[in-house]
Amino acid sequence: MLLQFREYKRCLDMMSNSISLPPAGLLRRFGALIYDALIIIALEMMAAGVVVAILEALVALNVMSYGSYADISDLLTRHPIWSYVYTFYLAAVWVYFFVFFWTRAGQTLGMRAWRLLIINEQDGNSISATQALIRLFTSGFGLANLTVPFDQQKRGFQDIWAKTKVVVLPKVN
């Protein structure tokens, strides 16, 4: 964690000293997206498992029952209220993952593997939660990155809207 902070601080110092970091290209962005997708799948499975385990424990303690549903999975996918609550919960986990990492470290785990960093376009600092939400909701599940080859500054559609840019960090010796 300390190494990541030092690397981040060094890159910000480089930017303030007018040494610009190169913008991230399309393939690097998609590489990070694939890494992050695998992490999100695992995270969503754990989040869903927690809900299922809690509800199964409540059924075992006779605090609740399946009612007319076959099992917990059927209840969580077909119930008129719980299906929306469960879907919202899983979406919130997904959103929180990106907003947390983008605002705290400027990069997700997949972006770190590909040495990518999201910074504020105006001052080069870390992005705000509002910018992170704008990036996330305008990204089209990564498809908005298809504008990168056509933009002179190599920005994705989400970067243009959120006033951010994704840069490639130098290799750490």
Image: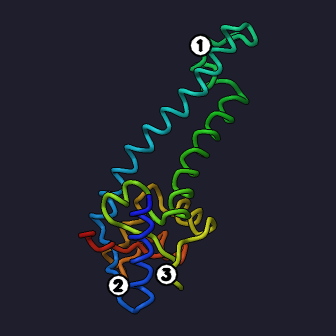
- Residue type of the residue flagged with mark 2: Gln
Q: Nearer the viewer, residue 150 or 170?
A: 170
Residue extending farthest to the left is: 173
Expressed as whole percent of the image width and height from the top left, the position of residue 42 reads 43, 37
Q: Residue at x 40, y 54 (%)?
A: 109
Residue at the disc numbered 2: 152
Q: Residue at x 63, y 67 (%)?
A: 130
Expressed as whole percent of the image width and height from the top left, the position of residue 76 reads 62, 25
In the image, taking residue 59 as reference, residue 106 lies left or right, namely left
Colour theme:
rainbow
- Residue type of the residue flagged with mark 3: Gly
Local secondary structure at mark 1: loop
Residue at the disc numbered 3: 124
Q: Residue at x 59, y 62 (%)?
A: 133
In the picture, the quarter occupied by the N terminus is bottom left
Mark closer to the chain start, 1 or 2: 1
In the picture, the quarter occupied by the C terminus is bottom left
Marks 1 and 3, how far apart at CA: 51 Å
Q: Residue at x 34, y 63 (%)?
A: 29
Residue at the disc numbered 1: 71
Expressed as whole percent of the image width and height from the top left, the position of residue 71 reads 59, 13
Marks 2 and 3, how far apart at CA: 19 Å
Mark closer to the chain start, 2 or 3: 3
What is the count of numbered marks?
3
Using the image, tell me which numbered label, if any, was put on residue 98. Answer: none
In the image, taking residue 30 as reference, residue 135 lies left or right, namely right
Expressed as whole percent of the image width and height from the top left, the position of residue 12 reads 44, 79
**Vertical placement of residue 51 versus 25, above or below:** above
Local secondary structure at mark 2: loop
